[in-house]
Amino acid sequence: MSEDTRRYFGTDGIRGTVGQPPITADFALRLGHAVGRVLRRTQAHPSVLIGKDTRLSGYMFESALESGLNSAGADVVLLGPVPTPAVAYLTRAQRAALGIVISASHNPYHDNGIKFFDAAGCKLPDEWEREVEAALDEPPQWADAAHIGRARRLDDAAGRYIEFCKASFSTHLSLRGLKIAVDAAHGAAYQIAPKVFHELGADVVAMGCAPDGLNINDGVGATHPEALARLVQESGADYGIALDGDADRLQMIGSDGRLFNGDELLYVLAADRLEHLRTRGKVRGPQHAGIVGTQMSNLAVERAITALGYEFVRAKVGDRYVLEELTQRGWQLGGESSGHILCLERHTTGDGLISALQVLRACAARERSVAEMLAGVQLYPQQLINVRLPEGFDWSANAAVQSAVQDAEREITGQGGRILLRASGTEPVVRVMAEAPDAQLAERTARAIAEAMEAAAA
């Protein structure tokens, strides 16, 4: 079953609007039962961890999944509100069969989702999702009364994850002397993120750490870093750390309010790794031979990374695809402009807190700020236009559109830029992106293609 033919699973689990299929309590009950049955095909008494973010609907889906899993004979361990990467870590550490996260990441409160990690803390393969979808079509097979699963809470889940995060920071370094503003987006890391930085020695100023079930990602967090930028400047902080609702995404703010996105942070980590290898007398090691970005990664950062001597490969947009490329090539570092950064020697999945700590560790080790580490790296302006087209309109086969694309590509590539056209997978929209050293050139070429599409579709 390909991604496009799946009824429920997308690129990162199942997601949608609460109360609309499939994000309903009855579906979550059926899903839990189906997952439990699939697990019991290979394990007599599987254990499943469930974590969630701070959305009000999380309670409902937690209860429904718990009941469905128990009814199929699987035990459940409830973690409460913890980041997505905490579930991945704890699934591995607790030797559980599966980890489940109830979250819609950076989306508003009225959305929610369900995603899964295997026993190793990694995303599950398509084949497993295919099995679950098939099990959803089968009649339920209730466990008898003696074999119903049990449920319990892991009361120190947050504390265990905090120690895991701290262990990723060099023991001979600390954050003493730094003032760090932390924005948890009123999400899953609201209790955890401030403690991690405080316990490593930083003076912490917190925002976005008072969830009420409805305010997750609302004007705060990685999707709204402007709020944190103001706090950094008002409080005199050295850095700002902005996470999203499930804390797998990171944006950072400098002391002057400057935003550092995922592309820039990826470069900092790549440069630090190369410096680390040089101090050990190695130019490069095989595990550091390349870096993975995405189709949206800034061209200036790609060129800066390749100038360091790395190979740079672009995956499709989505941290799942970045991970697939890294795994296939045996590399360790990759990420997206949005702030999903994968440091596979530290964790099996993207982790906003681990990524922030690796950037801060690099700065502490080199005695340079993030801005100083990025000296000479200037992002190219990107112009992104979403063009809504009628259902069935094939823009890729339209002669007028293709002529406009070719004209734009000739102009922009001659000036060191590029064009990217990407159809949305969820709506009849084409994303037209132009990137060039000159902002006016990027805007002009993107606009020309967008207007050609709209005229051809009219």
Image (cartoon, grey):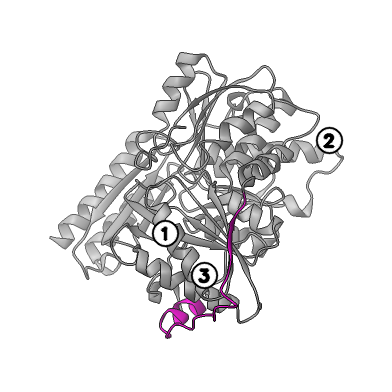
> Label 1 amino acid?
Phe
Q: Give the range drawn in magenta.
A: 130-154
Camera-nearest label, 2 or 3? 3
Q: Which quadrant is the C terminus positioned in?
A: bottom left
> Label 3 amino acid?
Leu
Residue at mark 2: 279
Q: Earlier in the sequence, mark 1 or mark 3?
A: 1
**Camera-side residue of 357 and 339:** 357
Disc 2 residue crowd, few under 14, some 14–19, many 20+, Cα 10 Å = few
Residue at mark 3: 69
Q: Earlier in the sequence, mark 2 or mark 1?
A: 1
Give the Cα separation between the discs numbered 2 and 1: 50 Å
Q: Is mark 3 on a helix, strand or loop?
A: helix
Q: Which residue is drawn at 68% across and 58% down?
A: 92
Position of residue 329 in the picture relative to residue 72 (left or right) = right
Judge whether residue 145 is colored magenta.
Answer: yes
Q: In this picture, is 215 found above or below 53?
A: above
| Residue, far front | 145
For the stretch drawn in magenta, the main secondary structure is loop
Q: Where is residue 143 in the image (x, y as percent from the top left)?
A: 54, 80
| Residue, far right | 281
Position of residue 147 in the picture relative to residue 138 (left or right) = right
Q: Which mark is residue 61?
A: 1
Position of residue 10 in the picture relative to residue 400 (left or right) = right
